[in-house]
Amino acid sequence: MSIPLIAGLGPQELIIIAVVLVLLFGAKKLPELARGSGQALRIFKAETKALGEDDDKKTPEQRDIDARNEAKPYQAPPQNPTVNPNDQGEPERRTDTPG
């Protein structure tokens, strides 16, 4: 009889992981952690599903704006003129007079 592997882990590894979890969190905290994780997963699934449904609820004006934004060609930002490396915003120093 062979036991199916979960993520490549055998039964011995799963038992070791379970023992470590009980030692780290305690037997009383594990159900609370599992409940919280399950609740977070349900909320994530609901929000992901709602994102797909939002596209169906858009007004015609919103669809027009989205279509215009997608149709606009990409415009590269304007190129900066070549900057003089000595021009750092500091006043120029005169070298012809003794200082």
Image (cartoon, rainbow, N blue to C red):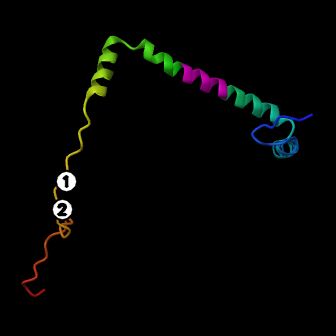
Q: Is residue 33 left or right of residue 68?
A: right
Decide which of 1, 15 is in the foreground and name it.
Answer: 1
Number of numbered markers: 2
Q: Judge whether 79 appears above or below 90 on screen.
A: above
In the picture, the disc for residue 80 is 1
Residue 84 on the magenta segment:
no
Decide which of 4, 13 is in the foreground and name it.
Answer: 4
Main secondary structure along the magenta-highlighted residues: helix
Q: Quadrant of the N terminus?
A: top right
Task: Name the residue rendered at 66%, 28% in the picture.
Answer: 41
Q: Is residue 43 left or right of residue 68?
A: right
| Residue 32, picture quadrant | top right
Count neighbours of disc 1 (C-alpha within 10 A) and say few if under 14, some if 14 to 19, many if 20 or more. few
In the picture, the disc for residue 37 is none
Residue 70: x and y in percent read 31, 27
Q: Quadrant of the C terminus?
A: bottom left
User: Mark 2 highlights which residue?
Assistant: 83
Task: Name the residue rendered at 80%, 42% in the picture.
Answer: 9
Q: Please name the amino acid that badge 1 sits on.
A: Asn
Q: Please name the amino acid that badge 2 sits on.
A: Val
**SS state under label 2:** loop
Are the residues tagged 2 and 1 within 8 Å (C-beta)? Answer: yes
| Residue 46, picture quadrant | top right
Residue 74: x and y in percent read 26, 36
Q: Which residues are magenta?
A: 41-49
Task: Name the residue rendered at 85%, 41% in the picture.
Answer: 26
Going by the picture, which residue comes out furthest to the bottom? 98
**SS state under label 1:** loop
